[in-house]
Amino acid sequence: MTFALVIHRLVILLCLQLFPTIVETYHNISLGSSLIASDDNSSWLSPSGDFAFGFQRIGTEGFLLSIWFNNIPEKTIVWYARTRTETLLQKGSKVELTNGGDFLLYDNQGLETWNSFKHRVAYASMLDTGNFVLINEDFVTIWQSFGDQTDTILPTQILDRGTESVLVSRHTQTNYSRGRFQLQLQPDGNLELYAAYDPSVAAPIYWESSTKQTGFQLVFNQSGHIYLTQTNGSILINLTPANVTSTSNFYHRATLDYDGVLRQYVYPKISMTGETSGVPKSWFTVWSVPPDICSSLKDPWGSGACGYNSYCRQDENQRPTCECPPGYNYTDPSNKLGGCSPNFVPQSCSASSQEAHLFDMKEIPQTDFAGHDYENLISITEESCKEACLNDCLCAIALFRDEVCWKKGFPFTNGIMEVGMSGKIMVKVGRENFSHHSDNDLNNDHTSTKIFIKQLLLSGSMAINLIFMSATILFTMWRYHNRTQKVLPYMLDMNVQAFTYKELALATNSFKEELGRGASATVYKAVLASGQRHIAAGRLDLLVEDDEEVIDDMKRLEKLVMIAIWCIQEEPTLRPTMYKVTQMLEGVVDVCVPPNPCTIPTSD
Ligand SMILES: *[C@@H]1O[C@H](CO)[C@@H](O)[C@H](O)[C@H]1NC(C)=O
Ligand SMILES: *[C@@H]1O[C@H](CO)[C@@H](O)[C@H](O)[C@H]1NC(C)=O
Ligand SMILES: *[C@@H]1O[C@H](CO)[C@@H](O)[C@H](O)[C@H]1NC(C)=O
Ligand SMILES: *[C@@H]1O[C@H](CO)[C@@H](O)[C@H](O)[C@H]1NC(C)=O
Ligand SMILES: *[C@@H]1O[C@H](CO)[C@@H](O)[C@H](O)[C@H]1NC(C)=O
Ligand SMILES: *[C@@H]1O[C@H](CO)[C@@H](O)[C@H](O)[C@H]1NC(C)=O
Ligand SMILES: *[C@@H]1O[C@H](CO)[C@@H](O)[C@H](O)[C@H]1NC(C)=O
Ligand SMILES: *[C@@H]1O[C@H](CO)[C@@H](O)[C@H](O)[C@H]1NC(C)=O
């Protein structure tokens, strides 16, 4: 036995002597005990019932081996086993204290998935402090949850100086995988909050106690006060205000929340009288650091307090929220800290001169995205700043402040919105609501047609006429289709009819050029020509009868008919994407003469 172990044992025995009350709270979990993850919530309770150790169900995804406040409806988790895979455990997983003194956690496949303690455990105990302990025959604590912190500390728990004791935030409120934020009392005595994206990357510190050389322990004492001590035990910094509510009437905890803020919370215990009567039953924040993480977490390499392409704002409860710029959505809707992605196809540098029309600049006032600008323009007006970004295919946002324009590309970082901030951000946003679909998304299904019909219905008084026209066109094509299959020479006849369409186009002074454009154009003309017979299409104006509004806008009608024919092409790859359709409707691109849908030999 080493000297250290002897000392350790002596200290334990001494403590047992000095604090006999703690001994009384021991509730032995004896050898041969086990718990199985299931919906009957079986757990090992502390003597008071305040804390439970066992499997808690997390949503529908699975279970966590955890310790929780058992006497409140929230069953707030204060510790959880970080398994090898950091995934939730499935029904049937088992924690067992074997007759041989092994303490083991198996997943539902029977694989050991956490720390194992073999041949050494005499008994285990869930204490009233919230500490779960494994004790050997010499009454030495060989493992305790208080020494294996996750994201929460409780009264009587201590964080030691060094690299062992570290609080790590969880991924989101309901996802217990490791998050980005850590709290550690560094070996040099400085208590630091930092954002650790990756252990190999320099982590930005966003709050510190400034106690280098002097800090020794972070203590959460029995009466609910958290403070930093120095080696001789005297208090360096009090984090908890002196007037904090007592631990006899309130549950206390301090948690490094998933948003990166360290908060001390209190929750009234069940009691109808005294301090807690009339106090709503929920967790109240006593204090938190940093006071404003949005402005404290400036990160030269990473994304800032929020994820990439999003900005941080303190809400009315002084909690940080991460928000997306207009035209952007959360990349992962279940994780608002995970950043945002554009809803539209970002501007491409391969065709920027064309595409600039398809984008708008939207303003977000009192906002900044610090760092990562690739160009700045000085002595410039706001309007020119907007234009400069709009016409630069690399520019995703521009920051304008004091006649200076900073251009930034993707991703944008360190976003913050704050009242009184002097600059404003201008975000380049795709004009189309549909444009987030990739070009292939809609080609092969009927969605484009459906949306198109909806567009037509929404386009005003012409709707009825257009439906009639579409039906006519379809009917015509059906007739034509039947004929082409039977009589090939009829095609030649159609070529003559095509000239009729040319006449029409010339009459309206448009589509002149397209007409000469090869075989498909010729076919299209045949369709209209054959359609004319059925409506006795020689003129489109006959189709719309007395609708003067439409007759006044024949050019637009013609265009709509052509778009309609594009949309009903038999060959799916010829159908335009909805993006293209909206471009055509808005006149951003010209509408080419569509081919006859029936002449593509796909079905034969
Ligand atoms: C707990 O178990 C140990 C080992 O079996 C035993 O020595 C001790 O007396 C027990 N304590 C209580 C409070 O039951
Ligand atoms: C287990 O806990 C859940 C949530 O607290 C509760 O809805 C359910 O009734 C409990 N099941 C049993 C068997 O106690
Ligand atoms: C929690 O987040 C991690 C990291 O994004 C992810 O891999 C994991 O699937 C999530 N777990 C659950 C239960 O959603
Ligand atoms: C806990 O710390 C506070 C503030 O330093 C002190 O007033 C109180 O007496 C301490 N409680 C215990 C049990 O040491
Ligand atoms: C602890 O040390 C500091 C300075 O090192 C001193 O000011 C303080 O009085 C000491 N406290 C005790 C209890 O010795
Ligand atoms: C404690 O004191 C602070 C000011 O120091 C005050 O803002 C807070 O409301 C007080 N809390 C309670 C519970 O009295
Ligand atoms: C999409 O359309 C809606 C309603 O017309 C509008 O409020 C929204 O700003 C549009 N989105 C974009 C990215 O332009
Ligand atoms: C973006 O979010 C809005 C509002 O939550 C939602 O209506 C819209 O469908 C989302 N867009 C995409 C592309 O996910």
Image: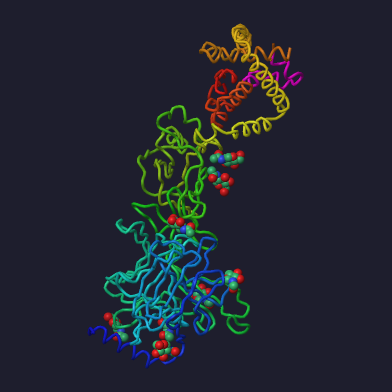
Give the image quarter of residue 498: top right
Question: In the rendered image, which quarter contains the C terminus?
Answer: top right
Magenta segment, prevailing SS (helix, strand or loop): helix
> Is residue 34 shown in magenta?
no
Give the total number of marks visible in the rendering: 0
* Residues in magenta, as a range: 539-558
Q: Is residue 239 left or right of residue 470?
A: left
Please, is residue 604 above or below residue 447 in the view? above
> Is residue 549 shown in magenta?
yes
Of residue 467 and residue 122, the one placed in the foreground of this image is 122
- Coloring scheme of the render? rainbow
Q: Is residue 23 visible?
A: no
Of residue 39 and residue 359, the one placed in the foreground of this image is 39
Q: Is residue 422 left or right of residue 100?
A: right
Q: Residue 375's x, y, as percent?
A: 35, 39
Please, is residue 482 above or below residue 111 in the view? above
Give the image quarter of residue 114: bottom left
- In this view, the residue farthest toward the right is 546
Please, is residue 255 above or below residue 248 in the view? above
